[in-house]
Image (cartoon, rainbow, N blue to C red):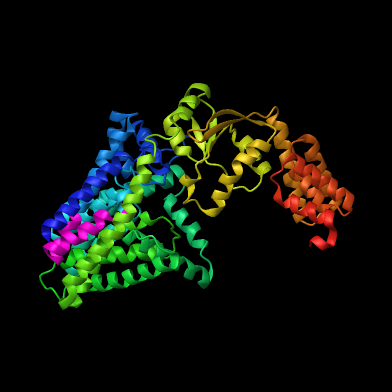
Amino acid sequence: MKKALLAAIAAACVFQAWMALHAPVGMFQDDALHLLLARAMRHGAFAFPDGSPATDPLPGFAFLLALPAWLVEPRWGLLRWPALAAGWAALGLTWRLARRVLGGEEALAVTLVVAMNPVFVENAGVLRPDILFLASSLGVWDLLAEARLGPAGLLAAGAALLRPQGALLVLGAAAALWLRRGGRVAAKFATALLLLAAWTVRNALVAGTASGYVENWARRAASLRGLAGLARHWGRLAAVLGHGFTGLRAPGWALAIIGAVLLVAVAAGAWDLSRGSREPSQPEVWGLAAAIFGASVLALHLTWSVSDPRYAIPLLPLCWIFVFFALRRFRSGCRIASLAITVALAVAAYQQDRVMARVRARAPAELWPRTMAWIRSQIPDNARIQSMFDMPVMLLTGRQSEEPPLVFNRDSWLAHCIGRGVGYIHLDQDLQRWRTLPPERFAVLLSLPAWARSMPYAREVFRDSEEGSAIWRIAHPDPWRFRRAWSEYGLALEELSAGAAPRAVRARLESAARLEPGLALPWAVMGHLSEGRGEKIRCLKKALLLDPTLDGARGELRQAFLGPAAR
């Protein structure tokens, strides 16, 4: 059995290497951001390309990338191998920890479940800090198990600068040491947070905020209103964890049940391991530290809306160590149950991994190479480009780039572009790349091509059908005039909401339409305010002539034509 498990783990590692070889580097938003920050760090700043100080993400991963990225630039693909090595180190540490409490065969079974997990495999060789943080946290618990508190504290200090869960890692270990070794030892270990504390002070001084993570968490927590909202979020969280822990593809309700059952088993195993009463020889401190860490991460996610299963990665080995340890409550069937779980998950993971391999094999090593080469040769260095892939565009072209705004009509989008000085739009036609976007951002992505086609001040200057990309140029003849017209339109809406007379509001709308004949929204609002059927139809038809994407105006025009029967 041991030989079979070892052979399966070795095959999984080879497969991870193949997946890493086909993983594009610098093509994701996250990895491009870290490479850009690593480049900025070499020049003495931790800032975004526009010069604004960065408080999110944490600086640890960019710091580690700074030197190797400088050595290989622009051959970013060479950086996938250190990332892959971090994943293999995480597997080795998973086996070491599992062997301490489970024994040889079960430890190998846990390692195989982690090694074949589709979420873990998908991130093999990807330049994100998730896998490195996983390896660091496992290393901290391994050092705690050997009572090497000094090295454990140093590694925990580094982990705290990789991911926000690193602070919970330090606090969990300090709490376990306080309960088992006393307050003095715990306080000494807690000094591992000093680097993170210094970083938050830096953020407050240069950016006026302790951390972008805190602001992001506050926004997400505020969106979960009421018991019904929390219940829906907890159901989604259970489904995300069910998928992340097992890699299974199933309906959301089924994954939620799987996730909830696993969390109950995890809680039982963590309780048994952390109290150490069933196995007096077990290393209580690391088990308790890991249990506190896992509980605190889950508590954080209970108020933080998540949709990406990679958020389960920091808990993945712990989940299966605790689940297999919980099975020891049923000693007669422990080995059989562990083997059955391993086989079932390995078969399911193999199916998912095979599908991912086919997709990864077809994916290009670099996204839009000809498009990015055209941007470098044809677009001025000081131009600003709008793209859903804003970070890769900045990395690959050296031009400033930003994401499209979250707006829902063409005129608001144009106003944003002119206000921000956006001169070019990069459009990507491959919607499969955007399947994980929130629905509102996906709606913007779908609307962008139609908005660009209907806008009088945009024209297509480059298209590559094979790469599925296009570049549009925005050139307004008088941006100052447009800003005046948009300001008039905004004042009209403010007066309308304040209860001003329709005649005064209409005067402002007419002024906006005269200043900027290409604006459709003033005509749409005038049509909405018009009481006469003929005037309403005239204004709404004018709005749709200027912007055929105004579905609301189209529906109102239909009602005006058909009368009460259409209502």
From the viewer's perspective, is 410 left or right of 168?
right
Image height check: is 165 above or below 546? below
**Residue displayed at 25% across by 66% down:** 341
Range shown magenta: 93-118
**Residue displayed at 44% across by 40% down:** 53
> Residue 66 location, x and y as percent?
31, 35
From the viewer's perspective, is 557 left or right of 380?
right
Which quarter of the figure has residue 366?
top left
Q: In which quadrant is the N terminus drawn?
A: bottom left
Whether residue 209 appears in this view of the structure is yes
From the viewer's perspective, is 435 left or right of 319?
right
Magenta stretch: residue 258 in it?
A: no
Magenta stretch: residue 106 in it?
A: yes
In the picture as drawn, the residue positioned furthest to the top comes out as 377
Whether residue 119 appears in this view of the structure is no
Q: Main secondary structure of the magenta part?
A: helix
Which quarter of the figure has residue 411?
top right
Q: In which quadrant is the C terminus drawn?
A: bottom right
**Residue displayed at 47% across by 70% down:** 231
Image height check: is 283 above or below 555? below
> Residue 96 location, x and y as percent?
15, 57
**Residue displayed at 33% across by 29% down:** 73
